[in-house]
Image (cartoon, helix red, strand yellow):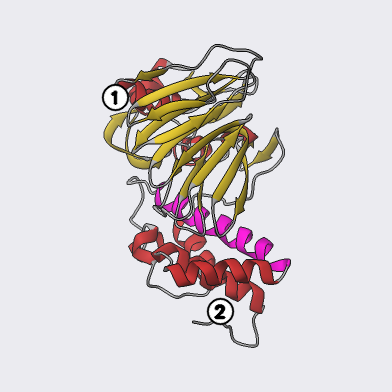
Amino acid sequence: MTTPTSSPDKDPVAQAAAEWMIRHDRGLTAAEQDEFSLWLAADPHHPAAWAEHRWGWDELDRLAGLQTSVHAMPDPDLLAPKQARAGQRWAWPVLAAAAAVAVGIFILSKPVAPGTPAGGVPVVRSLALIEQREMPDGSVIELNRGAVITEHYTAGERRVRLERGEAHFKVAKDAARPFFVEAGGVAVRAVGTAFNVRLDPASVEVLVTEGKVSVAAPSAPGVEPVIPLMGMNERTVVSLAPAAPAPQVTVVPPAEIEARLAWQPRLLDFTDAPLAEIVAEFNRRNPVRLVLAAEALRTVRLSATFRSDNVEGFVRLMESDFGMKAEWRGGDEIVLTGTP
Protein backbone atom coordinates (compact mmCIF):
# COMPACT_ATOMS: atom_id res chain seq x y z
CA MET A 1 0.00 0.00 0.00
CA THR A 2 1.31 3.44 -0.85
CA THR A 3 0.81 6.85 0.71
CA PRO A 4 -2.20 8.67 -0.74
CA THR A 5 -1.38 10.97 -3.61
CA SER A 6 -3.05 14.13 -4.87
CA SER A 7 -3.59 16.00 -8.08
CA PRO A 8 -0.69 18.33 -9.05
CA ASP A 9 -2.76 21.50 -8.48
CA LYS A 10 -3.08 20.82 -4.74
CA ASP A 11 -0.63 20.88 -1.85
CA PRO A 12 0.55 17.24 -1.71
CA VAL A 13 1.19 17.34 2.05
CA ALA A 14 -2.26 18.77 2.83
CA GLN A 15 -3.91 16.34 0.43
CA ALA A 16 -2.11 13.37 2.00
CA ALA A 17 -3.10 14.56 5.49
CA ALA A 18 -6.75 14.78 4.36
CA GLU A 19 -6.60 11.26 2.93
CA TRP A 20 -5.08 9.92 6.16
CA MET A 21 -7.85 11.66 8.10
CA ILE A 22 -10.45 9.76 6.09
CA ARG A 23 -8.58 6.48 6.62
CA HIS A 24 -8.38 7.08 10.37
CA ASP A 25 -12.08 7.83 10.46
CA ARG A 26 -13.03 4.41 9.07
CA GLY A 27 -10.23 2.60 10.99
CA LEU A 28 -6.66 1.69 10.08
CA THR A 29 -5.41 -1.79 9.42
CA ALA A 30 -2.17 -2.90 11.11
CA ALA A 31 -0.27 -2.28 7.88
CA GLU A 32 -1.80 1.19 7.53
CA GLN A 33 -0.89 2.03 11.13
CA ASP A 34 2.76 1.31 10.39
CA GLU A 35 2.56 3.22 7.11
CA PHE A 36 0.99 6.20 8.84
CA SER A 37 3.77 6.29 11.45
CA LEU A 38 6.37 6.27 8.67
CA TRP A 39 4.56 9.08 6.87
CA LEU A 40 4.51 11.24 10.02
CA ALA A 41 8.24 10.73 10.53
CA ALA A 42 9.18 11.29 6.89
CA ASP A 43 8.89 15.08 6.87
CA PRO A 44 8.62 17.73 9.63
CA HIS A 45 5.66 19.29 7.80
CA HIS A 46 3.59 16.10 8.02
CA PRO A 47 2.73 16.23 11.77
CA ALA A 48 1.60 19.88 11.48
CA ALA A 49 -0.59 19.12 8.47
CA TRP A 50 -2.08 16.12 10.25
CA ALA A 51 -2.86 18.18 13.38
CA GLU A 52 -4.59 20.84 11.26
CA HIS A 53 -6.81 18.35 9.49
CA ARG A 54 -7.62 16.49 12.70
CA TRP A 55 -8.78 19.77 14.26
CA GLY A 56 -10.98 20.47 11.25
CA TRP A 57 -12.50 16.99 11.30
CA ASP A 58 -13.32 17.39 15.00
CA GLU A 59 -15.04 20.69 14.18
CA LEU A 60 -17.31 18.88 11.72
CA ASP A 61 -18.25 16.38 14.43
CA ARG A 62 -18.98 19.36 16.63
CA LEU A 63 -21.44 20.66 14.03
CA ALA A 64 -23.16 17.30 13.90
CA GLY A 65 -23.78 17.54 17.65
CA LEU A 66 -25.12 21.09 17.50
CA GLN A 67 -27.93 20.58 15.04
CA THR A 68 -31.17 22.04 16.42
CA SER A 69 -34.76 21.37 15.49
CA VAL A 70 -35.82 25.02 15.62
CA HIS A 71 -34.50 25.42 12.06
CA ALA A 72 -35.20 23.69 8.81
CA MET A 73 -33.16 20.50 8.61
CA PRO A 74 -29.89 20.90 6.66
CA ASP A 75 -28.60 18.32 4.26
CA PRO A 76 -28.01 15.25 6.52
CA ASP A 77 -25.06 14.12 4.40
CA LEU A 78 -23.21 17.30 5.32
CA LEU A 79 -23.80 16.91 9.05
CA ALA A 80 -23.70 13.12 9.33
CA PRO A 81 -21.66 11.64 12.19
CA LYS A 82 -18.19 10.56 11.24
CA GLN A 83 -19.17 6.89 10.92
CA ALA A 84 -21.41 7.83 8.01
CA ARG A 85 -18.70 9.92 6.39
CA ALA A 86 -16.07 7.21 6.44
CA GLY A 87 -16.50 6.09 2.85
CA GLN A 88 -16.74 9.58 1.33
CA ARG A 89 -13.39 10.54 -0.14
CA TRP A 90 -14.01 14.26 -0.53
CA ALA A 91 -11.17 16.75 -0.54
CA TRP A 92 -11.02 18.48 2.84
CA PRO A 93 -11.43 22.09 1.67
CA VAL A 94 -14.64 21.23 -0.20
CA LEU A 95 -16.03 19.32 2.79
CA ALA A 96 -15.32 22.11 5.26
CA ALA A 97 -16.83 24.79 3.03
CA ALA A 98 -19.98 22.77 2.41
CA ALA A 99 -20.50 22.14 6.13
CA ALA A 100 -20.02 25.80 6.98
CA VAL A 101 -22.64 26.84 4.43
CA ALA A 102 -25.09 24.13 5.53
CA VAL A 103 -25.04 25.03 9.22
CA GLY A 104 -25.04 28.80 8.87
CA ILE A 105 -25.81 29.67 12.49
CA PHE A 106 -22.41 28.77 13.95
CA ILE A 107 -19.13 30.55 13.33
CA LEU A 108 -16.18 28.17 13.45
CA SER A 109 -12.90 29.49 14.73
CA LYS A 110 -9.79 28.09 16.32
CA PRO A 111 -9.37 28.69 20.07
CA VAL A 112 -8.43 32.26 20.91
CA ALA A 113 -6.90 33.91 23.92
CA PRO A 114 -8.97 34.21 27.12
CA GLY A 115 -11.33 37.17 27.08
CA THR A 116 -11.27 37.64 23.30
CA PRO A 117 -14.76 38.10 21.83
CA ALA A 118 -15.85 35.46 19.33
CA GLY A 119 -19.36 35.68 17.92
CA GLY A 120 -20.37 37.87 20.88
CA VAL A 121 -19.17 35.37 23.50
CA PRO A 122 -15.74 35.55 25.17
CA VAL A 123 -13.90 32.31 24.54
CA VAL A 124 -11.71 31.03 27.36
CA ARG A 125 -9.54 27.97 27.46
CA SER A 126 -11.91 26.15 29.80
CA LEU A 127 -14.51 26.11 27.02
CA ALA A 128 -12.34 24.14 24.62
CA LEU A 129 -13.92 20.90 23.50
CA ILE A 130 -12.71 17.66 25.04
CA GLU A 131 -10.07 16.26 22.71
CA GLN A 132 -10.33 12.69 21.50
CA ARG A 133 -7.04 11.42 20.13
CA GLU A 134 -6.73 8.20 18.16
CA MET A 135 -3.28 6.63 18.48
CA PRO A 136 -1.45 4.79 15.68
CA ASP A 137 -2.18 1.44 17.36
CA GLY A 138 -5.94 2.08 17.50
CA SER A 139 -6.03 3.11 21.17
CA VAL A 140 -8.23 6.11 21.95
CA ILE A 141 -7.33 8.80 24.48
CA GLU A 142 -9.82 11.42 25.70
CA LEU A 143 -8.16 14.50 27.17
CA ASN A 144 -10.08 16.54 29.70
CA ARG A 145 -9.77 20.31 29.34
CA GLY A 146 -6.21 21.45 30.00
CA ALA A 147 -4.70 17.95 29.91
CA VAL A 148 -1.34 17.48 28.19
CA ILE A 149 0.28 14.21 27.13
CA THR A 150 3.45 13.14 25.35
CA GLU A 151 3.74 9.82 23.51
CA HIS A 152 6.59 7.41 22.90
CA TYR A 153 5.91 4.23 20.95
CA THR A 154 8.54 1.58 20.24
CA ALA A 155 8.50 -1.93 18.83
CA GLY A 156 8.36 -3.35 22.37
CA GLU A 157 6.00 -1.02 24.25
CA ARG A 158 3.56 1.86 24.06
CA ARG A 159 4.19 4.63 26.57
CA VAL A 160 2.20 7.82 27.23
CA ARG A 161 3.14 10.44 29.82
CA LEU A 162 0.35 12.49 31.38
CA GLU A 163 2.10 15.80 31.97
CA ARG A 164 -0.93 17.62 33.34
CA GLY A 165 -4.62 17.10 34.01
CA GLU A 166 -6.89 14.12 33.42
CA ALA A 167 -7.35 11.61 30.60
CA HIS A 168 -9.26 8.45 29.84
CA PHE A 169 -7.48 5.65 27.97
CA LYS A 170 -9.17 2.94 25.92
CA VAL A 171 -6.29 0.65 25.01
CA ALA A 172 -6.19 -1.53 21.91
CA LYS A 173 -5.14 -5.10 22.69
CA ASP A 174 -1.55 -5.95 21.80
CA ALA A 175 0.00 -8.54 24.11
CA ALA A 176 3.41 -8.03 22.51
CA ARG A 177 3.43 -4.30 23.33
CA PRO A 178 2.14 -3.37 26.81
CA PHE A 179 0.62 0.08 27.25
CA PHE A 180 2.02 2.31 30.02
CA VAL A 181 0.71 5.62 31.32
CA GLU A 182 3.11 7.60 33.49
CA ALA A 183 1.88 10.43 35.74
CA GLY A 184 3.93 12.04 38.50
CA GLY A 185 6.21 9.00 38.70
CA VAL A 186 3.29 6.55 38.90
CA ALA A 187 3.11 3.98 36.10
CA VAL A 188 -0.15 2.29 35.04
CA ARG A 189 0.31 -0.83 32.88
CA ALA A 190 -2.39 -2.33 30.63
CA VAL A 191 -2.70 -4.48 27.52
CA GLY A 192 -6.31 -4.14 26.39
CA THR A 193 -8.50 -2.25 28.82
CA ALA A 194 -9.95 1.16 29.71
CA PHE A 195 -9.06 3.38 32.64
CA ASN A 196 -8.97 7.00 33.80
CA VAL A 197 -5.93 8.79 35.23
CA ARG A 198 -5.99 12.18 36.99
CA LEU A 199 -2.79 13.93 38.01
CA ASP A 200 -3.17 16.32 40.95
CA PRO A 201 -0.39 18.28 42.66
CA ALA A 202 -0.19 15.79 45.55
CA SER A 203 -1.55 12.53 44.12
CA VAL A 204 -2.46 10.39 41.12
CA GLU A 205 -5.92 8.82 40.86
CA VAL A 206 -6.50 5.70 38.76
CA LEU A 207 -10.02 4.46 38.00
CA VAL A 208 -10.50 1.26 35.96
CA THR A 209 -13.63 1.18 33.79
CA GLU A 210 -12.89 -2.01 31.84
CA GLY A 211 -10.44 -4.92 32.12
CA LYS A 212 -7.49 -4.90 34.50
CA VAL A 213 -4.36 -2.81 35.13
CA SER A 214 -1.39 -2.86 37.45
CA VAL A 215 -0.12 0.29 39.16
CA ALA A 216 3.50 0.87 40.14
CA ALA A 217 3.87 3.50 42.83
CA PRO A 218 6.97 5.67 43.37
CA SER A 219 9.73 3.77 45.14
CA ALA A 220 9.98 4.43 48.86
CA PRO A 221 11.70 2.61 51.73
CA GLY A 222 9.51 -0.13 53.15
CA VAL A 223 6.68 0.38 50.62
CA GLU A 224 5.83 -2.28 48.07
CA PRO A 225 6.23 -0.57 44.66
CA VAL A 226 3.47 -2.49 42.87
CA ILE A 227 -0.20 -2.21 43.79
CA PRO A 228 -2.19 -5.46 43.49
CA LEU A 229 -3.94 -5.91 40.17
CA MET A 230 -6.93 -3.60 39.80
CA GLY A 231 -10.14 -4.66 38.05
CA MET A 232 -13.21 -3.03 36.60
CA ASN A 233 -14.92 -0.42 38.83
CA GLU A 234 -11.92 -0.20 41.15
CA ARG A 235 -10.07 2.97 42.14
CA THR A 236 -6.85 3.90 43.88
CA VAL A 237 -5.17 7.16 44.84
CA VAL A 238 -1.38 7.16 45.00
CA SER A 239 0.12 9.88 47.15
CA LEU A 240 3.17 11.67 45.73
CA ALA A 241 4.38 12.67 49.19
CA PRO A 242 7.65 11.12 50.46
CA ALA A 243 7.17 8.02 52.61
CA ALA A 244 3.41 8.07 52.05
CA PRO A 245 1.39 5.02 53.17
CA ALA A 246 0.71 2.29 50.65
CA PRO A 247 -2.27 3.15 48.43
CA GLN A 248 -5.51 1.24 48.87
CA VAL A 249 -7.83 -0.16 46.19
CA THR A 250 -11.55 0.45 46.65
CA VAL A 251 -14.65 -0.61 44.71
CA VAL A 252 -16.54 2.33 43.22
CA PRO A 253 -20.36 2.20 42.73
CA PRO A 254 -21.59 2.77 39.16
CA ALA A 255 -23.27 6.07 40.11
CA GLU A 256 -19.99 7.43 41.46
CA ILE A 257 -18.11 6.31 38.34
CA GLU A 258 -20.63 8.14 36.18
CA ALA A 259 -20.18 11.27 38.27
CA ARG A 260 -16.39 11.08 38.11
CA LEU A 261 -16.45 10.63 34.33
CA ALA A 262 -19.19 13.17 33.64
CA TRP A 263 -16.58 15.33 31.89
CA GLN A 264 -16.43 12.85 28.99
CA PRO A 265 -18.34 14.23 25.99
CA ARG A 266 -21.59 12.72 24.84
CA LEU A 267 -24.63 13.85 22.89
CA LEU A 268 -27.41 15.37 24.99
CA ASP A 269 -30.74 14.92 23.22
CA PHE A 270 -33.63 17.10 24.42
CA THR A 271 -37.24 17.03 23.18
CA ASP A 272 -39.41 19.98 24.21
CA ALA A 273 -37.29 20.37 27.34
CA PRO A 274 -37.34 23.50 29.54
CA LEU A 275 -34.20 25.57 29.39
CA ALA A 276 -33.66 25.09 33.13
CA GLU A 277 -33.26 21.34 32.57
CA ILE A 278 -30.80 21.83 29.69
CA VAL A 279 -28.71 24.31 31.69
CA ALA A 280 -28.63 21.96 34.68
CA GLU A 281 -27.29 19.14 32.49
CA PHE A 282 -24.55 21.37 31.08
CA ASN A 283 -23.62 22.52 34.59
CA ARG A 284 -23.36 18.92 35.79
CA ARG A 285 -20.82 18.10 33.10
CA ASN A 286 -18.72 21.26 32.77
CA PRO A 287 -16.55 23.47 34.99
CA VAL A 288 -18.17 26.62 33.56
CA ARG A 289 -21.52 27.34 35.22
CA LEU A 290 -24.49 28.69 33.26
CA VAL A 291 -26.95 30.94 35.12
CA LEU A 292 -30.42 32.02 33.92
CA ALA A 293 -30.89 35.56 35.22
CA ALA A 294 -34.67 35.71 34.72
CA GLU A 295 -37.20 33.20 36.01
CA ALA A 296 -39.08 33.43 32.70
CA LEU A 297 -36.08 32.00 30.86
CA ARG A 298 -36.31 28.77 32.82
CA THR A 299 -39.53 27.78 31.07
CA VAL A 300 -38.35 28.42 27.50
CA ARG A 301 -38.68 25.05 25.75
CA LEU A 302 -36.28 23.65 23.21
CA SER A 303 -35.83 20.50 21.13
CA ALA A 304 -32.18 20.08 20.23
CA THR A 305 -29.11 17.87 20.40
CA PHE A 306 -25.87 19.22 21.87
CA ARG A 307 -22.43 17.87 22.58
CA SER A 308 -22.14 17.94 26.35
CA ASP A 309 -18.82 19.81 26.44
CA ASN A 310 -19.80 22.48 23.89
CA VAL A 311 -20.95 25.20 26.28
CA GLU A 312 -19.73 27.85 23.85
CA GLY A 313 -21.91 26.52 21.02
CA PHE A 314 -24.97 26.36 23.28
CA VAL A 315 -24.47 29.96 24.42
CA ARG A 316 -24.08 31.12 20.83
CA LEU A 317 -27.36 29.43 19.95
CA MET A 318 -29.12 31.21 22.82
CA GLU A 319 -27.81 34.54 21.55
CA SER A 320 -28.38 34.05 17.85
CA ASP A 321 -31.77 32.30 17.93
CA PHE A 322 -33.39 33.38 21.20
CA GLY A 323 -32.17 36.96 21.56
CA MET A 324 -30.38 36.37 24.85
CA LYS A 325 -27.22 38.11 26.01
CA ALA A 326 -24.28 36.34 27.63
CA GLU A 327 -22.24 38.00 30.35
CA TRP A 328 -19.10 36.52 31.87
CA ARG A 329 -18.66 36.78 35.63
CA GLY A 330 -15.17 35.77 36.51
CA GLY A 331 -13.69 32.88 34.57
CA ASP A 332 -16.21 30.20 35.46
CA GLU A 333 -19.72 31.64 35.18
CA ILE A 334 -21.87 32.79 32.24
CA VAL A 335 -25.09 34.66 32.99
CA LEU A 336 -27.82 34.53 30.33
CA THR A 337 -30.25 37.47 30.28
CA GLY A 338 -33.14 38.45 28.01
CA THR A 339 -36.88 38.28 27.49
CA PRO A 340 -38.34 35.13 25.95
Q: Are marks 1 and 2 in contact (CB under 8 Å)?
A: no
Q: Residue lying at the far bottom in this picture: please name it.
A: 8
Residue 7: percent from the left, percent from the top? 59, 87
Residue 206's disc is none
Residue 72: percent from the left, percent from the top? 34, 54
Residue 118 quadrant = top right
Q: Which residues are magenta?
A: 44-66
Tell me the amino acid under the disc marked 2: Thr
Q: CA distance from mark 1 to mark 2?
A: 45 Å
Q: Residue lying at the far left in this picture: please name it.
A: 271
Q: Earlier in the sequence, mark 1 or mark 2?
A: 2
Q: Check disc 2 and report the residue beneath it.
A: 3
Tell me the amino acid under the disc marked 1: Pro
Between 163 and 121, the residue placed more toward the observer is 163
Residue 52 is inside the magenta segment = yes
What residue is drawn where x is 34% and y is 24%? 277
- Asked whether residue 168 is in view, the answer is no
Q: Check disc 1 and report the residue beneath it.
A: 254
Where is 284 relative to 93, above or below?
A: above
Residue 125: percent from the left, percent from the top? 64, 35
Between 247 and 125, the residue placed more toward the observer is 247
State whether the magenta stretch is mostly helix, strand or loop: helix
What residue is drawn where x is 52% and y is 21%? 224
